[in-house]
Amino acid sequence: MANNSSRRSTIGDGGTALVEVEYVDDDGLKWKVLIPEHDKSHPERGIVVGPPDLLFLELPDEVHKRLHNGLYDRRLIRASDLRRRGQEVFAAVQAAYRVDVARVTEAYDR
């Protein structure tokens, strides 16, 4: 569900006001997007602020979702957010795979 954010900007000659909102899509991915201030009913149509689409990594769906949302939860939304926060990026990747390591370990216990 979309939530209002404190960021506001304008684009175009008409000065259309945009606001940053957060929402969760049908796949459970958390996004921050820019949408027109006057119509907040369709955040899925907004301009993605971040995190970036990670589909090019070709990760399994569960890992993709955990990584994407892990980056979001750590507020690693924009490229500028990554500066001097490499350890947090590493932690997000590590957490995304942690469940898979547990599954492999479980297989040995069978």
Image (cartoon, grey):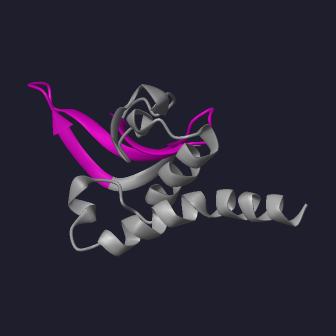
Q: Quadrant of the C terminus?
A: bottom right
Residue lying furthest right in this view? Answer: 110
Q: Quadrant of the N terminus?
A: top right
Residue lying furthest left in this view? Answer: 13
44 over 99 or under it: above or below: above
Q: Residue at x 36, y 60 (%)?
A: 76
Pick the residue in front: 65 or 77. Answer: 65
Q: Does residue 81 appear left or right of residue 66 in this picture?
A: left
Q: Does residue 71 appear left or right of residue 16 in this picture?
A: right
Which residues are the magenta region? 7-35
Determine which quarter of the picture holds residue 57: top left
Point out residue 16 in the picture as x, y percentages from the top left corner.
22, 30
Point out residue 104 in the picture as x, y percentages from the top left corner.
72, 58
Query: Residue 6: in sight, yes or no?
Result: yes
Q: Residue at x 44, y 34 (%)?
A: 55
Determine which quarter of the picture holds residue 33: top left
Pick the residue in front: 8 or 59. Answer: 59
Counting the numbered discs, the total is 0
Q: Residue at x 12, y 27 (%)?
A: 12
Determine which quarter of the picture holds residue 35: top left
Magenta-drawn stretch, dominant element (helix, strand or loop): strand
Magenta stretch: includes residue 37? no
Q: Residue at x 51, y 40 (%)?
A: 59
Magenta stretch: includes residue 12? yes
Point out residue 32 in the picture as x, y percentages from the top left corner.
41, 46
Query: Residue 2: in sight, yes or no?
Result: no
Point out residue 7 in the picture as x, y percentages from the top left corner.
29, 53
Q: Does residue 85 appear left or right of residue 103 in this picture?
A: left
